[in-house]
């Protein structure tokens, strides 16, 4: 029906912007649907499951239905009904009995209450989705909210930390602060918890320049998880691409928008960027047997990839049942509008794109020159923020590491796997480690990119924590209720003598040493280090390498630190200080393997334990020990003012063998003066600190499983 009450006049309105745009004396609604026959806006009053008013949008422009409603103000809750045929065989699934979430809603109220009414088809035959369901779902679906976007940002500015200066910390809003004793109880697990001064002080102490938050877009707890008493904790089941997840706020009905902005403002004030993990590759609606919540009921044929010859079914490149059709102009517009909203209105500094290969599938195959990447490249807003790809999906040809466009950085799983293998004493990994330590030029240089294109990682949310990586030889995911069948089986992990927790001092000591070695490799390599939150204080998930559904103490950070945890925090702080102190560890360009002048050392030299340069045969033979000398006088880079960067020569020795080995230190320079190698990192010590120094060409003993970093300088008088 059309509500034309005098106090709520209806006017044609405008087709842009999409969503609900409050204009002071009323609100403009604009909803895209090419195949609908009409679109209704249903208005709800607090406490009522049935709409108080239903207004049919009076105009349609370029497939956008629109209308202006008088006296619809911020706080008003609404939903959408889309009228049209229900013909799954043709890929069309309109069902006006189902209230839909506005894809452009800035805030949502309530959760999905699972039941048969959440599905567009009749569940009496669960294998048949062709019979339409006429059962309404008004009381069971979240309501969209009209918001007032105003916020006092004051002097807030994007920190714009250069890529080469960046250290990224991956964390979950809930998990990071739920148990933090300094955070007020009603702020724990919220955006305001992340903004707490104690949390920010910890991030700064360990050298973090950007926090990468697991998905904060409104997501749905899948029905199969709810039935098991679990939830979609990680949040990779998106319902709204514009709305912050309300569970992470202290209040409801739009409070999350304000508190999210407060969090960003607080982090920016301390120079910390905010990067969002975003999931534009699929939605929470699943396959043809999934619920009808938003996109499916608005324009199924345009929002999703469907099987060309059987459009009842979905192409699934993501393993979730559906894949967003980013190649469609209006769907691409939705994604870009969302990204710009988070940058311009919420002041976000960058994005990490989950299963980003799906967004590059124009029709079926990945295309790095496709519309999505072209649109990002030319956009004056989005081209200036950090763009990070998870460069794969689960579809055919989905693994695309190194093939993303020039503006993009990528999660480098080759760094992860090579580093893990090397520290498990796989001497065959040494050849690959040469590339990984120096920014992975074999992957990124051919496309004209630099070391910053490699986001180096050893652990992330998806897999073992660092402490578990050295404590478990296999996954232990029984708590997920899937018979331990979920999660990765190829972990390149080890338990060093006993699976899981142990009181054996020798095993515990070795595990901590290996953690220090892995972290040193991460922080001292060229590229951008990504640190999994909690790894800096030995966080464990008890061997669960797929804790996506564990919103409990298994995933929450334990801030009650013992001595070992405090030592590890000090160690990570020491590492980040080293990385910050030496520009040669943060190069913008790849090493060339050549001297800067005829009389200088090569910018990089690979050294064998006998002190001589490695040959091609040495790489092929494999080894457990590698030396890397980086010549300070050969750095061909300048600072922001154009001045040449001055840096000492560094020597890094990485020894993965279990037994000690001797190593002959190389020359520091070619001049006749005497020089000394001063140790600045020694993973044989729990905090990494050392005051040892050695003369050039001295033969030293390197303990088993150790990283040494030395600075070259003049010998003392």
Image (cartoon, helix red, strand yellow):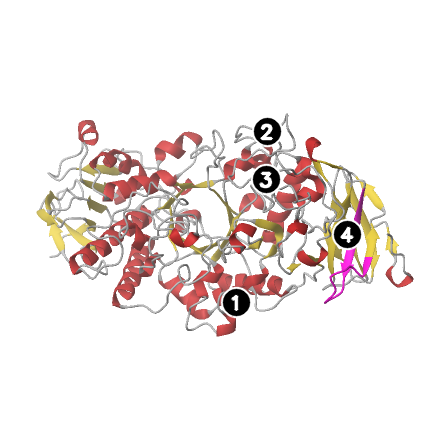
Q: Secondary structure at mark 3?
A: loop
Q: Where does label 2 land, which residue? A: 363
Q: Is residue 417 above or below residue 190?
A: above
- In magenta, the rendered stretch is 38-53
Left or right of residue 285: residue 595 = left
- Of circles 4 and 3, which is in front? 3
Q: Within the magenta stretch, is there residue 110?
A: no
Closer to the N terminus: mark 4 or mark 3?
4
Q: Residue furthest front?
A: 124
- Asked if residue 32 can be seen in this view, the reply is yes
Q: Is residue 196 above or below residue 31?
A: below
Question: Mark 1 packing: few (<14 Cα in 10 Å), some, or many (20+)?
Answer: many
- Asked if residue 600 can be seen in this view, the reply is no
Closer to the N terminus: mark 1 or mark 4?
4
Q: Where does label 4 land, which residue? A: 29
Estimate the spatial distance between the alpha carbons at disc 1 and disc 3, rounded to whole Å: 36 Å
Q: Where does label 3 land, which residue? A: 287
Q: Residue 668 location in percent, x, y? A: 17, 44
- Of circles 3 and 2, which is in front? 3
Q: Are marks 3 and 2 in contact (CB under 8 Å)?
A: no
Res. 16 mark: none
Q: Where does label 1 land, which residue? A: 192
Question: Mark 4 packing: few (<14 Cα in 10 Å), some, or many (20+)?
Answer: many
Estimate the spatial distance between the alpha carbons at disc 4 and disc 3, rounded to whole Å: 29 Å
Q: Secondary structure at mark 2?
A: loop
Estimate the spatial distance between the alpha carbons at disc 2 and disc 1, rounded to whole Å: 42 Å
């Amino acid at each position: 029906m059309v509500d034309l009450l005098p106090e709520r006049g209806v006017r044609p309105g405008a087709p842009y912007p999409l969503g609900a745009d409050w204009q002071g004396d009323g609100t403009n609604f604009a909803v895209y649907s090419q195949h609908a026959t009409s679109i209704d806006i249903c208005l709800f009053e607090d406490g009522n499951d049935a709409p108080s008013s239903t207004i049919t949008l009076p105009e349609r422009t370029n497939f956008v239905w629109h209308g202006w409603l008088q006296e619809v103000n911020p706080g008003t809750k609404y939903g959408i009904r889309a009228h049209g045929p229900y013909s799954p065989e043709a890929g069309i699934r309109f069902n006006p009995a189902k209230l839909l979430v506005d894809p452009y809603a800035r805030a949502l109220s309530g959760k999905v209450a699972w039941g048969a009414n959440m599905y567009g088809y009749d569940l009496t035959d669960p294998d048949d989705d062709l019979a339409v369901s006429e059962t309404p779902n008004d009381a069971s679906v979240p309501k969209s909210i009209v918001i007032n976007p105003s916020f006092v940002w004051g002097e807030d500015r994007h920190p714009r930390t250069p890529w080469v200066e960046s250290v990224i910390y991956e964390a979950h809003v809930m998990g990071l602060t739920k148990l933090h004793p300094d955070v007020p109880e009603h702020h724990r697990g919220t955006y305001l918890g992340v903004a707490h001064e104690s949390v920010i002080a910890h991030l700064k102490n360990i050298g973090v320049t950007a926090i990468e938050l697991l998905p904060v877009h409104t997501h749905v707890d899948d029905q199969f998880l709810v039935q098991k008493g679990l939830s979609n904790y990680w949040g990779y089941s998106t319902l709204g691409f514009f709305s912050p997840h309300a569970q992470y706020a202290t209040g409801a009905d739009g409070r999350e928008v304000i508190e999210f902005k407060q969090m960003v403002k607080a982090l920016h004030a301390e120079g910390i960027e905010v990067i969002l993990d975003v999931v534009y590759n699929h939605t929470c609606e699943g396959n043809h047997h999934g619920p009808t919540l938003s996109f499916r009921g608005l324009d199924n044929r345009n929002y999703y990839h469907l099987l060309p010859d059987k459009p009842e079914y979905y192409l699934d490149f993501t393993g979730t049942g559906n894949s967003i059709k980013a190649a469609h102009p209006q769907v691409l517009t939705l994604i870009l509008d969302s990204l710009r909203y988070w940058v311009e209105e919420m002041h976000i500094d960058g994005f990490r794109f989950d299963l980003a290969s799906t967004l590059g599938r124009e029709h079926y195959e990945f295309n790095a020159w496709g519309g999505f990447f072209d649109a990002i490249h030319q956009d004056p807003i989005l081209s200036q923020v950090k763009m990070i790809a998870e460069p794969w999906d689960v579809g055919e040809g989905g693994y695309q590491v190194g093939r993303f466009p020039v503006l993009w950085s990528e999660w480098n799983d080759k760094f992860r796997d090579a580093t893990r293998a090397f520290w498990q004493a796989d001497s065959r990994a040494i050849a690959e480690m040469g590339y990984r330590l120096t920014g992975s030029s074999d992957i990124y240089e051919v496309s004209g990119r630099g070391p910053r294109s490699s986001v180096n990682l050893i652990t992330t949310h998806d897999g073992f924590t660092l402490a578990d990586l050295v404590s478990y030889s296999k996954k232990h995911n029984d708590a997920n209720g899937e018979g331990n069948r979920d999660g990765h089986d190829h972990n390149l992990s080890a338990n060093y003598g006993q699976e899981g927790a142990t009181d054996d001092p020798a095993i515990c000591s070795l595990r901590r040493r290996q953690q220090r070695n892995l972290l040193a490799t991460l922080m001292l390599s060229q590229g951008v280090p990504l640190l999994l939150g909690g790894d800096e204080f030995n966080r464990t998930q008890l061997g669960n390498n797929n804790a996506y559904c564990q919103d409990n103490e298994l995933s929450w950070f334990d801030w009650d630190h013992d001595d070992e945890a405090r030592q590890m925090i000090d160690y990570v702080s020491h590492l980040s200080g080293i990385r910050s102190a030496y520009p040669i560890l943060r190069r913008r360009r790849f090493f060339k393997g050549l001297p800067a002048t005829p009389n200088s050392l090569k910018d990089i030299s690979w050294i064998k334990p006998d002190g001589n340069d490695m040959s091609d045969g040495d790489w092929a033979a494999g080894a457990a020990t590698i030396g890397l000398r980086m010549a300070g006088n050969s750095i061909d880079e300048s600072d922001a003012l154009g001045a040449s960067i001055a840096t000492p020569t560094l020597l890094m020795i990485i020894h993965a063998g279990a037994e000690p080995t001797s190593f002959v230190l190389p020359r520091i320079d070619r001049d006749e003066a005497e020089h000394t190698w001063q140790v600045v990192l020694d993973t044989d010590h729990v905090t990494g600190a050392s005051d040892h120094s050695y003369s050039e060409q001295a033969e030293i003993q390197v303990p088993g499983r150790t990283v040494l970093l030395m600075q070259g300088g003049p010998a003392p008088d």
